[in-house]
Amino acid sequence: MFDFLKKKKNPNPDATRLLASILVVYPTLQSVTYDPDTEMLELSFALNGKFSQNDFEGFLAYVADSVETFHHLEGFGGATIELNVEGIYGTYFLNVRRDMATVTCRELSLLTELASNYFGENLIDDTGDMVPDEDFIIDREDYLEQMLTNIRQLRLEGRLVGVRDRERVMVYAG
């Protein structure tokens, strides 16, 4: 009855850092959501422009084929990936859902490259004029891969949403 009186658990700080790190390393991602019920990570890219249904169907097939090939080369079996597009009036969100059990930093890099290559300037990107130092990116990716490995060993509770707000990233517990 009085839900506001219940003491809420603080989110796992490692999970919070994981979502924030994903947004820092991949500036083309606009949000990252972790759903504990399905143990899925949802990555959202934002697009501006006019697109046809064929554009999106082509992209979804392109990603599905590329990720399937990647999983085959990496020796993954049974990885779950779901793709969808939503939007209206020239702003669209490409959503990629991946199971936390098998997602890797290399796959996240692949997904962001695929979106960038396919949609080019229409993909909303938060890098601006800043070009990150390559050593910084390599260190961040190594850190991110280590965090993904550590998170798999924990049972995360509570939904987490990481969003980009200009030059900042914020993670909310939901």
Image (spheres, grey):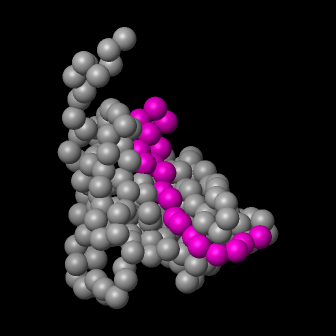
Q: Is residue 40 above or below residue 8?
A: below
Q: Residue at x 62, y 78 (%)?
A: 118
Q: Is residue 110 left or right of residue 13?
A: right
Q: Is residue 173 left or right of residue 28?
A: left
Question: What is the x, y in percent for residue 141?
Answer: 30, 69
Q: Residue at x 60, y 66 (%)?
A: 91
Residue 35 colored magenta? yes
Circle count: 0
Q: Is residue 134 above or below residue 3?
A: below
Q: Is residue 38 above or below residue 41?
A: above
Q: Examine the rendering and report whether any part of residue 102 can be seen.
A: no
Depth order, front residue of 168/32: 168
Quadrant the N terminus occupies: top left
**Magenta stretch bounds:** 33-52
Quadrant the C terminus occupies: top left
Question: What is the x, y in percent for residue 13?
Answer: 20, 45
Depth order, front residue of 23/97: 23
Q: Quadrant of residue 67?
A: bottom right
Residue 142 colored magenta? no
Question: What is the x, y in percent for residue 138?
Answer: 27, 76
Magenta stretch, overall SS: strand
Question: What is the x, y in percent for residue 152?
Answer: 33, 44
Depth order, front residue of 119/88: 88
Q: Residue at x 64, y 58 (%)?
A: 87
Q: Residue at x 25, y 27 (%)?
A: 8
Depth order, front residue of 148/48: 48
